[in-house]
Amino acid sequence: MAGRLEGKKALITAAAQGIGRASAEAFVREGAEVIATDINMDALGALKDQPGVTLRKLDVLDGDAVKEAAGQIGAVDALFNCAGFVHHGTLLDTTDEDWDFSFNLNVKAMFRMCRAFLPAMLENGGGSIINMSSVSSSLKGIPTRCVYGASKAAVLGLTKSISADYLKQGIRCNAVCPGTVQSPSLDGRINAFDDPVQARKDFIARQPLGRLGTAEEIAAMVLYLASDESAYTTGQFFVVDGGILN
Ligand SMILES: NC(=O)c1ccc[n+]([C@@H]2O[C@H](COP(=O)([O-])OP(=O)(O)OC[C@H]3O[C@@H](n4cnc5c(N)ncnc54)[C@H](O)[C@@H]3O)[C@@H](O)[C@H]2O)c1
């Protein structure tokens, strides 16, 4: 099927690599006009030749920049809040600074993005917000994911709240919960172990399907939620996890 997002305008955060980039590419293939944003403009440049893509530097931790972007861009039909950070550690490994950084990036920035873009979406008659959570959240306790899991659980609460408050005004809000997905930051996490070869094996071993997910497999779900095919779906979370929650 082609043209699933024809005529739609979408904004994606953290679009320079991983799931965000794969989602930008999928949205473009299906006819959307895409505003691809990230803090890493060099990596974001990989999308420059995609038709219908505008590249924009946006640090989602910068509240003023978020407001300015919303003011300049106006209404979007789909907002994919993908930016997030995986902190590695148990509760006793987690400092106040780690906690605040993860909650600021994984939750508060998402709250601010939604708050900034929602008024124009409402004025425009509605739209779809897709929030990046994780299977490591209130759905499942995963070792060494203390603040990550807590922050991604908060994403589910935020998602349900937005859905409940604005569904009558045409806003749908859903969350995506991936398992372990091959991405540059996963490579970074693996390489930080003393034995990266064993660490990769361990990451794969926690996936019952016996392999890591691909960014494209998560983007397929994000695309569905951005499209009108999911018009009757809001306030839900969608697990794409290689069978972890089986
Ligand atoms: N990879 C996985 O296994 C996995 C699993 C579940 C959920 N997730 C979530 O998916 C999202 C993307 O992860 P990924 O692994 O696909 O990509 P990634 O972590 O490799 O890339 C993240 C991108 O976010 C950008 N970024 C960082 N801080 C930013 C900021 N302040 N403002 C804007 N952009 C910023 C980076 O420049 C980078 O391009 C994250 O929210 C992550 O928690 C990933």
Image (cartoon, rainbow, N blue to C red):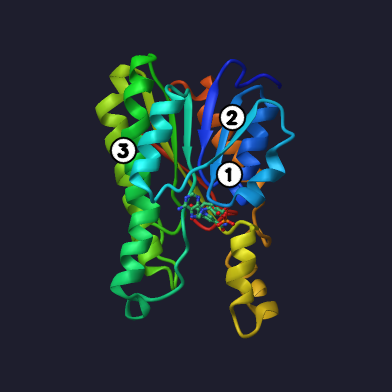
Residue linked to disc 3: 160
Residue, disc 2: 34
Q: Is residue 137 above or below residue 175?
A: below
Please state if 148 lies on the left or on the right of 36 as rendered.
left
Q: Residue furthest right?
A: 49
Q: Amino acid at mark 1?
A: Ala
Residue at the bottom extreme of this rendering: 194
Pointer 1 or 2: first along the chain: 1
- Quadrant in which residue 180 is drawn: bottom right
**Picture quadrant of residue 25:** top right
Check disc 1 and report the residue beneath it. Answer: 15
In the rendered view, tell whether residue 132 sits above or below residue 236.
below
* Picture coordinates of residue 146, whole percent (x, y): 37, 69
Q: Nearer the viewer, mark 3 or mark 2?
A: 2
Check the image and report above or below for 170 versus 202. above
Near mark 2 (Cα within 10 A), the count class, few <14, some 14-19 or many ≥20, is many
Whichever of labels 1 and 3 marks the residue nearer the N terminus, that label is 1
Which amino acid type is shown beneath numbered disc 2? Answer: Val
Q: Position of residue 122 (x, y in %)?
A: 33, 19
Q: Amino acid at mark 3?
A: Lys
Return the residue nearer the eye: 118 or 156.
Answer: 118
First in residue order: circle 3 vs circle 2:
2
Crowd around label 1: few <14 · some 14–19 · many ≥20 (10 Å): many
**Could you say whether the residue bearing mark 2 is in a helix, strand or loop?**
strand
Circle 1 SS class: loop
Q: Is mark 1 within 8 Å of ligand 1?
A: yes
Look at the numbered disc 3 and say if its residue's Cβ is closer than 8 Å to ligand 1. Answer: no
Measured Cα–Cα span from mark 1 to mark 3 = 24 Å
Which residue is drawn at the image coordinates 38% and 22% (left, top)?
A: 121
Residue drawn 38% across the image and 76% down it: 90
Mark 1–mark 3 contact, CB under 8 Å?
no
